[in-house]
């Protein structure tokens, strides 16, 4: 029974990951535009039931359908609700800003070389196997479930939560069940970080009603975003990231991310400004990328079906 459950679960996860890696994910569209599915970039809509949480608990962001969200927003009187612009607390979105990094600046020669190394193999029919993406979004990768890292997890996360503390802000993500710490106690970024971090070393401060986050010291194994039709936008260990967050009203948060990495890109990569909606009546659950599950799927389903690979 357990093996059957694992295979079924893995199949759903891997198909969602493969679809997500095979097309460009866009900013969360208006509710009416969502597909009637429950995976990755889609959610329950229309007559499809939501996932009912245990008594006394709340649903996960992706477990709600659109009626759930509307009902909870009405129940919590979200519209016109008073808010503190310096309080970012809440559960936000259920997928991520998929269009944050769509148009990269030209790459340096080193950048072009490293980007070429992210392009994987094709099968005998010329279809990409995405086998260089080790994050769990690469359907044919022999290595899976490396952390997404920042800022890639900003584009795909199943919902996130800000927790405001006196000396730091925590951003917790359902995907990977992980978090990052943004220090607000006045410390400066390390000039020479002693070790690379997947989420970077981060500090934050307020400029008016805008929360500014600056980060450095990233692990260069992560990607900024997956590229189309294959590969991923890479960065070096010298990448720095600047974010701007602003709570526009009680139920809407605005965000914009800029990347500076002169070793890889010839100009700053100014990400698209986006907004994410408060998910009233939800709390983060647990979603892990499980290496053994992905290995089972790759070895028993994906690779046999995709046939023998050929080099690109």
Image (cartoon, rainbow, N blue to C red):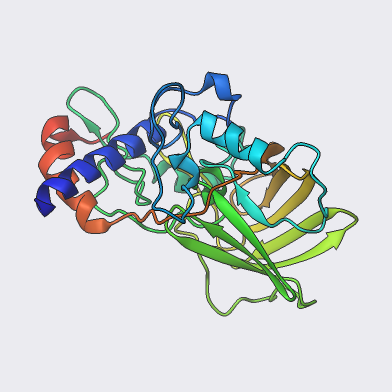
Q: Is residue 103 visible?
A: yes
Q: Give the residue drawn at x 36%, y 43%.
A: 137
Q: Give the residue drawn at x 54%, y 19%.
A: 33
Q: Residue 158 appears at what percent x and percent y?
A: 48, 45
Q: Quadrant of residue 306?
A: top left
Q: Give the residue drawn at x 58%, y 42%.
A: 93
Q: Residue 193 appears at what percent x and percent y?
A: 61, 76
Q: Is residue 218 visible?
A: no
Q: Give the residue drawn at x 43%, y 30%.
A: 44
Seen in the image, is 128 located left or right of residue 270?
A: left
Q: How many labels sit on residues?
A: 0
Report the residue that reaches farthest toward the right: 208
Q: Quadrant of residue 28?
A: top right
Q: Residue 142 appears at what percent x and percent y?
A: 23, 51
Q: Is residue 170 above or below residue 291?
A: below
User: Of residues 261 and 146, which is closer to you in this image?
Assistant: 146
Seen in the image, is 147 located left or right of residue 126?
A: right
Seen in the image, is 302 located left or right of residue 48?
A: left
The C terminus - image quarter = top left
Q: Residue 75 appears at what percent x and percent y?
A: 65, 40
User: Of residues 98 and 231, which is closer to you in this image?
Assistant: 98
Q: Is residue 152 above or below residue 38?
A: below
Seen in the image, is 16 located left or right of residue 89?
A: left
């Amino acid at each position: 029974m357990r093996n059957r459950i694992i295979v079924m679960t893995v199949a759903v996860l891997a198909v969602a990951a493969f679809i997500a890696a095979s097309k460009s994910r866009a900013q969360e569209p208006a509710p009416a535009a969502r597909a009637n599915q429950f995976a990755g970039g889609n959610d329950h809509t229309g007559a499809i039931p939501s996932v009912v949480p245990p008594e006394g608990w709340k649903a996960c962001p992706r477990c709600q359908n659109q009626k759930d969200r509307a009902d909870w927003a009405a129940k919590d009187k979200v519209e016109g609700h008073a808010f503190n612009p310096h309080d970012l607390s809440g559960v936000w979105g259920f997928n991520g800003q998929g269009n944050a990094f769509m148009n990269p600046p030209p790459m340096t020669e080193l950048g072009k070389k490293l980007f070429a190394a992210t392009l994987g193999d094709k099968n005998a029919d010329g279809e990409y196997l995405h086998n260089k993406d080790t994050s769990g979004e690469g359907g044919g990768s022999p290595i899976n479930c490396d952390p997404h890292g920042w800022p890639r997890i900003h584009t795909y996360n199943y919902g996130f939560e800000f927790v405001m503390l006196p000396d730091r802000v925590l951003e917790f993500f359902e995907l990977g069940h992980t978090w990052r710490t943004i220090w607000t106690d006045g410390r400066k970024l390390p000039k020479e970080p002693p070790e690379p971090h997947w989420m970077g070393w981060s500090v934050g401060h307020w400029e008016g009603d805008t929360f500014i986050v600056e980060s450095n010291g990233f692990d260069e194994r992560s990607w900024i975003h997956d590229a189309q039709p294959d590969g991923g936008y890479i960065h070096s260990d010298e990448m720095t990231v600047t974010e701007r967050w602003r709570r526009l009203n009680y139920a809407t948060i605005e965000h914009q991310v800029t990347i500076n990495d002169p070793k890889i890109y010839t100009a700053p990569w100014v990400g698209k400004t986006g907004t994410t909606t408060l998910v009233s009546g939800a709390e983060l659950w647990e979603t892990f990328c499980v290496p053994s599950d992905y290995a089972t799927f790759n070895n028993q389903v994906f690779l046999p079906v995709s046939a023998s690979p050929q080099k690109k």
